[in-house]
Amino acid sequence: MVLRMITGEKLEKQQARMEALGIYDADIEENFIRGSGSGGQKINKTSSCVQLLHRPSGIEIRCQKTRSQADNRYWARHELCERIEEKVLGEKSARKQAAEKIRRQKRRRSRRAKAKMLDAKTKQGTKKKLRGRVRPDD
């Protein structure tokens, strides 16, 4: 018995999403190529890597996430939907929003780090001032 991760329900949802974005199977050129990377003889013998070319937009996707060709077809189409959605929605796309959120977090983090560093420098400076020479009372 072969256990597949991609269910029929997921495939139907993906098909509906593709239609909503205006992606049709007739516009997609699909090739199965041999993958690369670790895996030894098995990877050299099977064509499990999926390459999609969406002719209207010129977007090319290569997917080799799993050893299953069917699963890779699903993930390649998923990535194609993501890229076209990003192109259509621009700033509103989920991927761009997530990237912007991370950028804001890093900016906040670096500001805090700078303030902490400056505070440490100030403390060190006050310590050094206290080390001044002690003059004998004449």
Image (tube, rainbow, N blue to C red):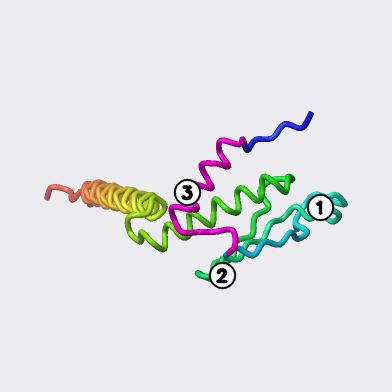
Q: Residue at x 54, y 54 (%)?
A: 79
Residue 111 place in picture, x, y as percent: 28, 52
Q: Does 92 appear above or below 71?
A: below
Give the residue furthest to the front.
Answer: 26
**Residue 122 inside the magenta-drawn segment:** no
Q: Amino acid at mark 1?
A: Ile
Question: Quadrant of residue 2 in the image?
Answer: top right
Q: Main secondary structure of the magenta part?
A: helix
Q: Does 44 appear above or below 116?
A: below
Is 126 positioned to the left or the right of 52 in the image?
A: left
Work out how far the residue at label 3 is from the one at label 1, CA to CA, in angstroms: 31 Å
Q: Does 28 appear above or below 97?
A: below
Tag nearer the camera, 2 or 1: 2
Residue 47 place in picture, x, y as percent: 79, 55
The answer to which of marks 3 and 2 sits earlier in the sequence is 3
Work out how far the residue at label 2 is from the one at label 1, CA to CA, in angstroms: 28 Å
Q: Secondary structure at mark 1?
A: helix
Residue of label 3:
17
Read off the magenta span: 7-26
The answer to which of marks 3 and 1 sits earlier in the sequence is 3
**Residue 22 inside the magenta-drawn segment:** yes
Residue 94 place in picture, x, y as percent: 39, 50
Residue of label 1:
43
